[in-house]
């Protein structure tokens, strides 16, 4: 009997109605173990007619889950779904079917708290895109388990803000529901409620055990099983060692039983049929039976399952490895776990790969020294990909020691390169360089190899990250020559990409843009989405640092689209963080705040460069607006960034310097600023030298610009405020235009004040007003009010201009011509306007413009 779930069932039914009209949704059904999530979803599915297509899948509570378990389940109901392709291609295939179907589709994925990494990738992919489909993706999970660093938590955090995502919570039963269930028994409802806390599974299991009130649910489950005959109990025990379900044929074999024995277990309600398989009604019941098995009986069942599965045509490696691990047989574990780990890694299920590799590495004697070293290296690489560089270092060092003993030179060099990557993530740069240098020496002794070419590229990459031009160009040229000798398209591409990146940040920026555009075009021709994403990321972040904003924004926005398509979440966060920084520098502060807050909501990595970049931009907006919370945030980012490269930290440091200068306490900024200035002088970055040097000059620590400082900063430090203002106008940084004008005579200061008032930059505006008053200037423009500064719908000034022209009926080409901006920039503004207004067409945007008071004469104050 399903009680107190009518509202939840109605909500699911409404989502199916929406899906039938092309408005799909992701429904997250949460609750504690035994709350009735599965019962709710199965009641919903069972009540459906033949109109929708229903796909049922579940995640496995195996020792290590098999990759893409629910997608494998779906494939049995989706003819022609090829699971041997790249996972992203499989996901895209499923999405296309759900988008271009006549009948709506209900997809159920149960128990995502057990999901492997590849399944979480599937949920992330589908959840982001399901809104414009005819699908309802229903996922159940235990919300009390998805906490802390649980892998599913980040995915749910990314999907929860989407308008197509819905959350349902399955609550405990009320005392009235418990009393209704117990009305035909001798059980006291209040005592049953006290014992079970209204947990639906616990309530029904206690009642099914015969009306007694056992001390534990396990006792209730076992009391129910004890009512079966011996051979039916053997069937139940066999199913208990196979998490989720067991094929009926396998259950008969493992229990040496007959179909009648299976039917008896089904009739008693201990097991339920699921197509051609058997399962428990709840995982808690399965675990209760398995945990009660005597050790010898448990070992025998797992060994028998291994015999059965090894002869299966499908040979499910994850299931085989699970039973080998549960049997505790080292010979079987080292035989099956590494292969299962390789399969998981190939499908992107990194957490599962780690578990399989660790299981095998418990038995180094059975593995042998070479397999042990190779598994340590594989484990280390997976751990680094999971952003666990400390654990990665431990495993890679084990591999290095093994390869040294075995005198395997190329393997040793490769492992040293992997160690360097982990050490860089740990910000232990000197140790990393030592490892990389040894790797190069070993590889050079072997002659020309692709491994050598890729290692040279990585050396160039890390010199670029240190902003050292000469060695970066030297090593990228060495890598390029090896790529030519080998005819390696991969080495040729990474060399081209790195040459362009080095130019854009420490060389000829225009040359860098040209080379990176060429690299992206070549990656498109190669149909290599990973390369496309990397090239766009370099063009976007490098272009942002070089203040080539139009190029950077276009690359970053396309890069986000590509990264979303292949679920590179780190790349999405990093690109958004640079959009936040660029919007800050362009004076689009509302946009900067939105981008920064989006990064903060969607990443759990609170020490990475995406987070530091976004939060530094947010902190600097607060400084320039005079908003609270700026100092604490920038001090936190400054502390975090000290162990990163200088380009990741100078923005926060300069923000603190600006805050303390505006507050007339420059001495508070000196320590961090001088430390960062010394680091900036050790680079070839003109923008690092320029901006950090500018604040050293502004605070009186230097008297002239440092060599190699970016021109706009150098001009102002040299006393040419007019030249500096003109340079900043050309680049498109209005606040910096105002800071340059502020060093001029009163008429220039008044022009600066006009810019600052339009930006909402009150602290510097107040400082200039005080300076003008002290110079005897009367009749200053009034300080703008909050009402004046608040644009309708959160639109920026430029977006309001574009919206006004849309309302007048102008097309993108006409708007671009009128505002002297590119058509691509207009398209970006139009897209942002649609998002903020919640509209999809120009007609709807024009109606919204009229509604919020944006007309031919600009913006009218609301009501």
Image (cartoon, rainbow, N blue to C red):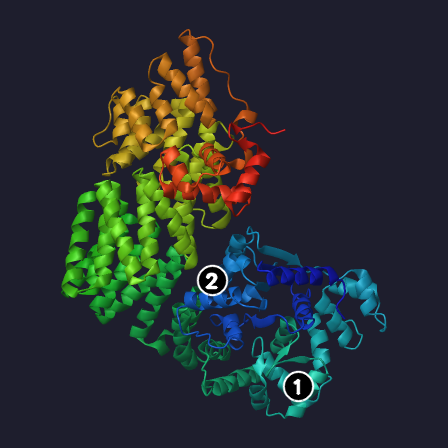
Rendering coords of residue 159 (x, y %): 53, 55
The mark total stands at: 2
Asked whether 748 or 570 is in front, the reply is 748
Packing grade of label 2 (10 A; few <14, some 14-19, many >=20) is many
Residue found at the far front of this picture: 809
As drawn, is 768 to the left or to the right of 301?
Answer: left
Kindly report which numbered mark, 2 or 1, lies closer to the viewer in this rendering. 2
420 is higher (above) or lower (below) than 789: below
588 is higher (above) or lower (below) than 34: above
Work out whether residue 422 can be spotted: no
Which residue corresponds to the image point at 56% horizontal and 39% vertical from the top-left?
A: 848
Work out whether residue 742 can be spotted: yes
Which residue corresponds to the image point at 41% horizontal and 35% vertical from the top-left?
A: 584
The residue identified by callout 2 is 121
SS class of the residue under badge 2? helix
Q: Which image quarter: residue 443?
A: bottom left
Packing grade of label 1 (10 A; few <14, some 14-19, many >=20) is many
Of callouts 2 and 1, the N-terminal one: 2
The residue identified by callout 1 is 233
């Amino acid at each position: 009997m399903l009680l107190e779930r009518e509202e939840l069932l109605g909500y699911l039914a409404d989502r199916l109605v929406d899906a039938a009209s092309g408005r799909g949704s992701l429904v997250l059904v949460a609750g504690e173990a035994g709350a009735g999530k599965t019962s709710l979803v199965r009641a919903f599915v069972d009540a459906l007619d033949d109109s929708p297509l229903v796909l049922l899948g579940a995640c496995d509570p195996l020792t290590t889950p098999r990759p893409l378990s629910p997608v494998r389940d779906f494939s049995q109901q989706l003819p022609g779904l090829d699971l041997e392709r790249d996972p992203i291609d499989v996901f895209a295939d499923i999405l296309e079917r759900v988008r271009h179907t006549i009948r709506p589709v209900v997809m159920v994925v149960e128990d995502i708290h057990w999901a492997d990494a590849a399944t979480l990738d599937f949920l992330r992919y589908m959840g982001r895109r399901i809104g414009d489909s005819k699908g309802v993706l229903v996922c159940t999970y235990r919300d009390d388990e998805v906490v802390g660093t649980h892998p599913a938590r980040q995915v749910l955090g990314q999907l929860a803000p989407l308008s197509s995502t819905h959350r349902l919570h399955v609550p405990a039963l009320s005392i009235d529901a418990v009393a209704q269930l117990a009305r035909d028994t001798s059980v006291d409802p209040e005592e049953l409620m006290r014992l079970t806390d209204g947990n639906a599974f616990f309530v029904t299991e206690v009642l099914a055990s015969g009306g007694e009130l056992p001390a534990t649910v396990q006792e209730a489950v076992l009391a129910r099983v004890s009512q079966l005959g011996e051979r039916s109990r053997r069937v139940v025990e066999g199913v208990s060692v196979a998490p989720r379900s067991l094929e009926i044929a396998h259950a008969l074999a493992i229990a040496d039983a007959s179909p009648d024995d299976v039917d008896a277990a089904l009739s008693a309600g201990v097991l339920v049929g699921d197509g051609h398989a058997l399962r428990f009604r709840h995982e808690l019941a399965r675990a209760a039976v398995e945990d009660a098995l005597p050790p010898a009986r448990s070992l025998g069942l797992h060994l028998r399952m291994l015999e059965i599965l090894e002869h299966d045509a499908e040979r499910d490696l994850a299931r085989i490895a699970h039973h080998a691990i549960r049997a505790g047989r080292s010979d079987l574990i080292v035989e099956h776990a590494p292969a299962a780990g390789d399969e998981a890694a190939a499908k992107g299920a990194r957490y599962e790969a780690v578990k399989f590799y660790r299981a095998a590495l418990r038995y180094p004697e059975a593995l042998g020294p070479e397999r042990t070293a190779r598994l340590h290296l594989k484990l280390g690489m997976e751990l680094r990909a999971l952003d666990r560089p400390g654990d990665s270092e431990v495993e890679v060092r084990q591999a290095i020691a093994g390869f040294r003993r075995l005198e395997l030179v190329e393997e040793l060099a490769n492992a040293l390169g992997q160690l360097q990557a982990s050490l860089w993530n740990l910000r232990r740069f000197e140790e990393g360089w030592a490892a990389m240098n040894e790797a190069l020496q070993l590889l050079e002794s072997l002659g020309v190899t692709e491994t050598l070419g890729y290692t040279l590229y990585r050396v160039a990459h890390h010199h670029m990250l240190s902003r050292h031009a000469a060695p970066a160009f030297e090593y990228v040229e060495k890598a390029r020559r090896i790529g030519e000798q080998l005819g390696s398209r991969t080495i040729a591409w990474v060399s081209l990409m790195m040459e362009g990146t080095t130019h854009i940040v420490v060389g000829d920026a225009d040359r860098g843009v040209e080379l990176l555009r060429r690299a992206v075009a070549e990656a498109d021709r190669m149909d290599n989405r990973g390369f496309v994403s990397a090239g766009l990321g370099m063009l976007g972040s490098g272009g942002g640092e070089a203040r080539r904003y139009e190029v950077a924004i276009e690359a970053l926005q396309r890069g986000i689209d590509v990264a979303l398509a292949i679920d590179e979440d780190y790349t999405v966060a990093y690109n958004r963080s640079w959009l936040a920084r660029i919007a800050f520098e362009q004076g689009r502060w509302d946009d900067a705040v939105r981008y920064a807050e989006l990064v903060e909501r969607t990443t759990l990595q609170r020490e990475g460069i995406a987070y530091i970049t976004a939060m530094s931009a947010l902190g600097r907006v607060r400084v320039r607006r005079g908003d609270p919370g700026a100092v604490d945030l920038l001090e936190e980012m400054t502390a975090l960034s000290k162990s990163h490269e200088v380009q990741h930290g100078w923005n926060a440091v300069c923000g603190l310097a600006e805050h303390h200068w505006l507050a007339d306490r420059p001495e508070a900024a000196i320590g961090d600023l001088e430390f960062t200035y010394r680091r900036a002088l050790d680079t070839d970055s003109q923008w690092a030298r320029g901006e950090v040097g500018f604040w050293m000059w502004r605070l009186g620590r230097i008297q002239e610009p440092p060599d190699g400082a970016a021109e706009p900063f150098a001009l102002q430090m040299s006393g040419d405020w007019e030249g500096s203002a003109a340079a900043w106008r050309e680049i498109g940084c209005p606040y910096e235009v105002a800071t340059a004008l502020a060093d001029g005579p009163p008429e220039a200061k008044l022009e600066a004040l006009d810019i600052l008032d339009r930006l909402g930059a009150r602290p510097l505006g107040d400082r200039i007003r005080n300076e003008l008053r002290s110079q005897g200037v009367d009749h200053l423009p009034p300080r703008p009010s909050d009402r004046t500064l608040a644009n309708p719908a959160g639109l920026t000034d430029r977006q309001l201009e574009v919206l006004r022209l849309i309302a007048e009926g102008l097309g993108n080409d006409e708007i671009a011509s009128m505002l002297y901006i590119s058509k691509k920039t207009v398209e970006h503004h139009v897209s942002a306007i649609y998002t903020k207004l919640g509209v999809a067409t120009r007609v709807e945007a024009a109606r919204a413009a009229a509604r919020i008071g944006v007309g031919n004469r600009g913006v009218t104050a609301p009501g």
